[in-house]
Amino acid sequence: MSYQYNGSMIQIAHPVQSISVNKHRVIFSDTQGLKNALFQKASDARQFVKWLKAS
């Protein structure tokens, strides 16, 4: 599964085991390991986490 943000794709291999959020940065662990996503706005990071938890 993937999430598109500002023209780039963030690849997610479910299930997601952990999520950590720090304003503009979201770090999550899936079956492929630890991944780091950086967003321009904190609201974009929150929206990504909401999508990540729902999918």
Image (spheres, rainbow, N blue to C red):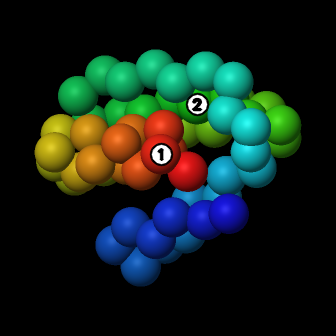
Dot placed on the residue nearer the N-terminal end, 1 or 2: 2
Q: Quadrant of residue 45?
A: top left
Left or right: 44, with 14 as reference point: left
Query: x%, y% of residue 36?
Result: 54, 38
Q: Quadrant of the N terminus?
A: bottom right
Q: Residue at x 61, y 21 (%)?
A: 18
Query: x%, y% of residue 10?
Result: 56, 59
Q: Quadrant of residue 33?
A: top right
State whether residue 8 appears in this view.
yes
Q: Secondary structure at mark 2?
A: strand
Query: x%, y% of residue 38?
Result: 38, 45
Whole-number angstrom distance, CA of label 1 to CA of label 2 = 14 Å
Kind of residue indicated by mark 1:
Ala
State whether residue 37 appears in this view.
no
Left or right: 29, with 46 as reference point: right
Q: Is residue 51 above or below residue 30?
A: below
Q: Residue at x 61, y 65 (%)?
A: 2
Report which residue position mark 2 lands on. Answer: 28
Question: Dot 1: within a 10 Å radius of its alpha carbon, few (fewer than 14), some, or many (20 or more) residues?
Answer: few
Total label count? 2
Report which residue position mark 1 lands on. Answer: 54
In this rendering, the label closer to the viewer, 1 or 2: 1
Image disc number at residue 45: none
Q: Is residue 21 above or below residue 5?
A: above
Query: x%, y% of residue 22?
Result: 31, 22
Q: Residue at x 74, y 45 (%)?
A: 14
- Most extreme residue toward the front is 54
Q: Secondary structure at mark 1?
A: helix
Q: Is residue 36 above or below residue 1?
A: above
Q: Is residue 47 above or below residue 27?
A: below
- Most extreme residue toward the right is 32
